[in-house]
Amino acid sequence: MRHRGKSRYTQTYGEHRGQIPIPHTIHERPLEAQQRAEVGHWEVDTVVGKSDGPCLVTMVDRKTRYLLTKKSDHKRALSVNQAMGQLMDTLPNKIFKTMTPDRGSEFAKHAEITKDRPVLFYFPDAHVPWQRGSNENINGLLREYMPKGQGLSQFSNKAIATFAQKINTRPRKCLSWKTPYGVFYQQALHLI
């Protein structure tokens, strides 16, 4: 064709397919969340095994680095929402103030979670994973137990809970060599 690599769109054209509604950006997130000043500000992501199989929903508290995780049947918005809801049901609503997921399509139905709970979602800039560094680090720790390329269906819920418990009881330099479990529950008792 005579097109020769020329753009078919004007410079002001923006892609709109597959974009999720973003109510708040990470730059609007409360100062307490930015500075890791209090418990209750969570980073959310998914860890994928083989394509179109189960995935792992991970939620990490920014201040304490405490991990909540649950297996989801698929990496689709409805399934991920169910897993997040079940994780959030394990703790009082006061513990969840903000959520910062990535811009993946699995978080497209985030508004359904905010209907039932007083939590706000803040989305990072596109292609900037270091804005959610705590969660990316924890996902790397999970990969020690579940290497890339392995399907997650071979890991039972009990095994995944064991992996999360090992990570939550590992002392961290950023917490003055305390464990995320100890710091989280010490801080959470003041909120409840």
Image (cartoon, grey):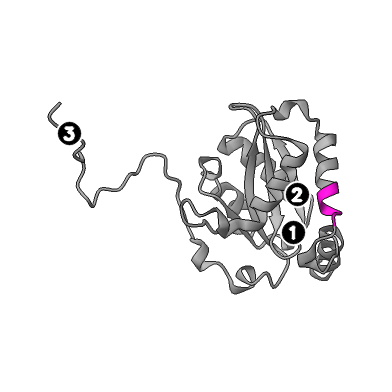
Q: Position of residue 87 (x, y in %)?
A: 74, 47
Which residue is label 1 attached to? 65
Indicate the position of residue 102 as horizontal and vertical percent values: 55, 50
Residue appearing at x 83%, y 65% in the figure:
183
Residue pictured at 45% horizontal, 50% vertical: 21
Helix or strand or loop: what does disc 1 sit on? loop
Give amino acid for label 3: Arg
Task: Count neighbours of disc 2 (C-alpha within 10 A) and say few if under 14, some if 14 to 19, many if 20 or more.
Answer: many
Residue 169 included in the magenta stretch of the image: yes
Q: CA distance from mark 2 to mark 1?
A: 10 Å
Q: Left or right of 85: which side holds 30?
A: left
Question: In the rendered image, which residue does mark 2 sit on?
Answer: 68
Q: Judge by depth and name the residue closer to the eye, 189 or 105.
A: 105
Residue depicted at x 81% and y 30%? 156
**Which span is picked out in magenta?**
166-170
Nearest to the eye among marks 2 and 1: give it. 1
Pointers 2 and 1 in contact (CB under 8 A)? no
- x and y percentages locating residue 76 in the rendered image: 57, 35
Residue in the foreground of this view, choosing between 15 and 24: 15
Q: Quadrant of residue 75?
A: top right
Q: How many marks?
A: 3
Chief SS of the magenta region: helix
Q: Which of the two residues, 160 or 119, is positioned nearer the viewer here? A: 160
